[in-house]
Amino acid sequence: MSDGRLRTDLRRRMAQTSGRGRKLRGLLALLMPYRLRLAGMFVALVAGTAAALAPAPLAQRAIDDGILAKDTGTLTVIVVIFVVSAFIVWVATYVQTYLTGWVGQRALQDLRIAMFRHLQTQPVAFYERRPAGVLISRMTNDVEALNQLVTDSVVTLFTASLTLIGSVVILITFDLELALLTFLVFPVLAVGSFVFRLASADAFKRTRETIGAITGYLQESLSGIRVVRSFAQEDRQRARFDELNEQNLQANMKTVYLNASYFPAVEFVSALATVGVLLYGGFQVLDGDVTVGVLVGFIAALNGFFDPIGQLSQVYTTYQSGMAALDKIFELLDTEPTMTEKPDAVDLPRPLRGEIRFDAVSFEYAGSDGDTKLALADIDLVIPPGQTVALVGATGAGKSTFAKLVARFYDPTRGRVTVDGLDLRDVRAHSLRSQMGIVPQEGFLFSGTLRDNIGFGRPEATRADVEAAAAAVGADFIARLPEGLDTEVGERGVQLSAGQRQLVAFARALIADPRILILDEATANVDLHSETRIEDGLKRLLAGRTAIVIAHRLSTIRQAGRIVVLDGGRIVEQGTHDELMDAEGAYWRLYRDWAQQAAA
Amino acid sequence: MGTGMPTFRRLLGFLAPHRRGVIASGILALLAMLMTVSIPWLIGRAIDGLQRGDRDDLVHLGVAVGIAGVLRFALTVFRRLVAGKVSLGVELDLRHRLYTHLLSLELSFFDRQQTGQLMSRSTVDLQAVRFFLGYGLIFMVQAALTIVLAAAAMTATDPTLAAISLIPVPFVIVVAARYGRHARPALQEVQQRIAELTADVEENIGGVRVVKSFAREERQLSRFTHAVGRVFDQAMVSTRLQAFYNPLIGFLPQLGLAAILLYGGRQVIDGNLTTGEFAAFYTYLLMLLGPMRTLGVMLGMSQRATAAGARLFQILDREAQIVGPPHPRPLPPGGGRVELRDVSLRYEGAADAALDHVDLDIEPGRTVALVGGTGSGKTTLVQLLGRLYDPTSGAVLVDGVDVRDLDPQALRREVAFVTDDPFLFSASVRENIAYGRPEASDEEVEQAARRAQAHEFIDRLPDGYETRVGERGLTLSGGQRQRIAIARAFLVDPRILVLDDATSAVDATTEQAIKEALREVMADRTTFVIAHRLSTIALADEIVVLEAGRVLAHGGHDELLRESELYRAIVEKGLPDQVFLTRKPRETEVAGL
């Protein structure tokens, strides 16, 4: 490696271990609300540590004034003080452990909530670019690493630091020369720790990355278990998992090598210092410059000096991985949402009239190679309040993108989308979406009862409301379930068939009583029998609302007030079913294809 | 200790494959401890020497302390290397075992488990276990060793004084054990609540579109906040325990120190003990303070590991219910004959049977359409063919062999599924298509894609077949994902092909083209299609009408039109505008199916 490369490599490693400013500010902000408790904790900490330091000087007194002076009375008094100080330690440690736990746990919970809230502000596109496993890992593995720090190490960190400071004072008061001799270890340890930090920065980062990869893979394996199973690819999945596991081991092994050399070295330095004190102090005793009591006390106090150094180096690992985790967490929290609400955003009127207008709207998305792809090009369209518009076109024609722009899941690249005359970028998302119902192709259900799921958009709905909504969409399978509406549905509603989930999603949209309704391939999974019944419900649902319907089954859309045919992101045709049939254009061809194969 | 001990012993069992490493690190730790213990003894001797005014002795003993320090350094480095290897090995094994076990469990297990719960056990709980086995246990052993060695050294110096100063030790152990008893259930509950939290997060990330489209962020946040609050409350329960017991464990040994000062001091005054002996004694007890405190902390850690271990064992102990027989029969050559003999299946917790005494006999090479309302049992039926579930009673036979007598993997290689909501892995399009047959050539992959009408859009993707499709293939539309899944099934060239509403999101023009290809693909294999569209049903040689888990009718199209009222209803509602379509009367059209 050339000199220059070496230097950049070093600089990079330094940079990795830094970023302290951000972390410190972040941590302070987290702890700020609990400053009173924090102050209480520090008082307890100082009291406890001070009391914990007392044994060494007390022992010295006991030896010099009591034992060597053959004064049992003084000895007894000193021992009583000794016991009292131990008792103070007990009480102070209780207070301090409790408060540390309280503040630490509370701060962790705040952090979790902040991350959750932050994730909520992110647009849909954010989730499309990131594997769910990685996001979950942020909120579990990384918070857990911090938790480790809080529960096991923070107290050690504080007590050890204070003990160290106290010991320094005690050593100095014992004997300045011996103390200065002992403090020679500081520069040695400082250089050692610095080298250790540089050497280990990469290793710790790599460890966190590899564990993140494992979590992500595990998550994917679990969600895709059906595919794994039905293609009998367990062996391959396992092989890949083992590979990731092995990578994690290798990354971890590096930290083991580093730790194996660092911690014993700290111990070794302390042993050397003890030898130095023993020899130097011994000669001083022999020369009569120092009393035996002072030397014994000093050596006893050396424990109080080296123990915290050892402890600090032990928790250093936990500290480092905690800090690495904190880095990852703040990195997430610092991701600015690409779609934000303007500070002066206004609420849409309630109820909406429901007029949707596209003004020269284009939408491009970034491909994986950095190219942009055009999904919608120069769309001009006005949907008057209450009209049902059907979007028709081949896969990839831009139908779903169109719907997503209306819901403001994305912002247009050019042009503007307005509802009731207001640009969606100027309105508060809540005021839009709370008046909008979207039924996607996949009916995602939350764990909970069917009733919870149907009432998702309107939790205050009564049981009768929920029942009415379920009946309106023809979800009569619910009545046949042993627990009816109170049936728990598993994660992603796996115990229900796709069609059943879809019916629930319908009822969910219906009960929210939206002014604008978007059905994105909503009936694809529903069997014909149910579909006919839903259609009855749909007619009622669509009445008086603006609706955008995307369907491949053209029979479902013939009733639409207007049909818009999209091709390659452009509107190629629009009109009613009859008009378009007469025109014998794109729609006519699509319809012919569909009808032919529907009856083939 | 309740169920704690067996769990704990079983956790130790994970160390068994690394026995040699564990023993080696134990020996190394013991030797290092000897060095640590020898240092105060040497110092004590040196101080005695000082009182005699012996300079040489001081130098010799000082050098001896230095040598002990060097030896301890070397021993500790080795001990840490060996122990580190063991710890990482345990982690690797544990994760491997858990993953392997999860992969072996039957699907109905996953139906009832939240992914987040499983994730939490495989990450947070596993971490607690490996932390303890890897580091905690060694610290604990080291602490215990220190205590034993120091106690031995003290007893050798002055048994009476040793006895007095060690009085607190049994109390420490009793208190620590008591702490453990209370702490374990508390910590287990913390882990459980963290798992609930993880499940909550997982669900919110998965369902982000629903949350956003209903503008329910506030409610989800308040639910999450509630879950977080539950974690906090429980964490505080265990913090309070920790806050009470930990300092108590630290306090008790201080009484030993006080006893030494009081009693030992008098002994020195009375001339029964030298000042050096007294100093050494005192130093030993000081040495014990750290390990006793460590012991307390580590006991807490071991409790957490035991709690986490219990949760891991809950998964590991759940035996796979669908396993191959010890001596599986080979799947005889055949064209995919399928027989269902009096098959019933009731899902756990369901009131009604999903399949109710189904008898079915399908000749090899036939294409069978399954028709019926939502929840009539169509998907359940086809899942039995790949033995993704076992029937509650009855038997499923493929080419004359009960599927339970076959190696499940061998069977599944002959049965390919395409579902309406296909799952794609975060990998390239090519890898996804070749998922069932990774060794397939690029030409074969492309051919499968062409047949599934996927080649054209794949070709237009930024990197063609090497384009990575995101998690759950989110960057692709539903129809595109379905087509990749169809190509994936085509490529494995199965004996039995199952299309479960496989083209629901594909547009009509493309679907038409896929069907053309299907005719070709279906020719020499048994195919089951589940569809709601007549056009798909029309691909079938025979049709099975299901309702509430029972076969209502089974036969050809014409036959069913005559005999099945339900089928007739389905056909009538499903047919498009006949006048536009062909200007032919319906009967003719139907006859042409």
Image (cartoon, rainbow, N blue to C red):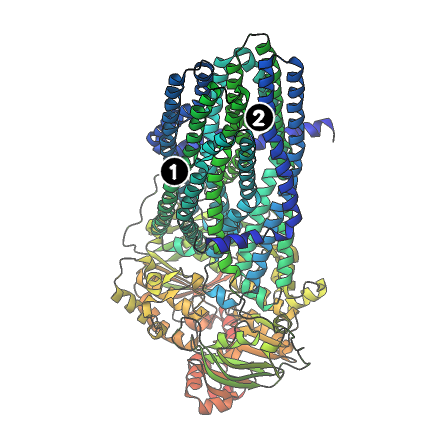
Q: Residue at x 56, y 57 (%)?
A: B98
Numbered disc 1: what chain?
B
Tell me the element at label 1: helix
Hey, what amino acid is under mark 1? Ala
Question: How many numbered badges does the structure rendering display?
Answer: 2
Q: Residue at x 29, y 57 (%)?
A: A459
Answer with left or right where residue B59 lies relative to residue A102. right
Residue B356 placement: quadrant: bottom left
Q: Position of residue B302 (x, y in %)?
A: 49, 46
Indicate which disc, 1 or 2, sits on the residue closer to the N terminus: 2
Q: Which sits in the foreground, A430 or B547? A: B547
Mark linked to residue B511: none
Q: Which sits in the foreground, B51 or A494? A: B51
Within-10-Å neighbours for mark 1: few <14, some 14–19, many 20+: many
Mark linked to residue B40: 2
Q: Which residue is mark 1?
A: B243
Q: Which sits in the foreground, A582 or B496? A: B496
**Above-or-below relation of B353 to B453:** below
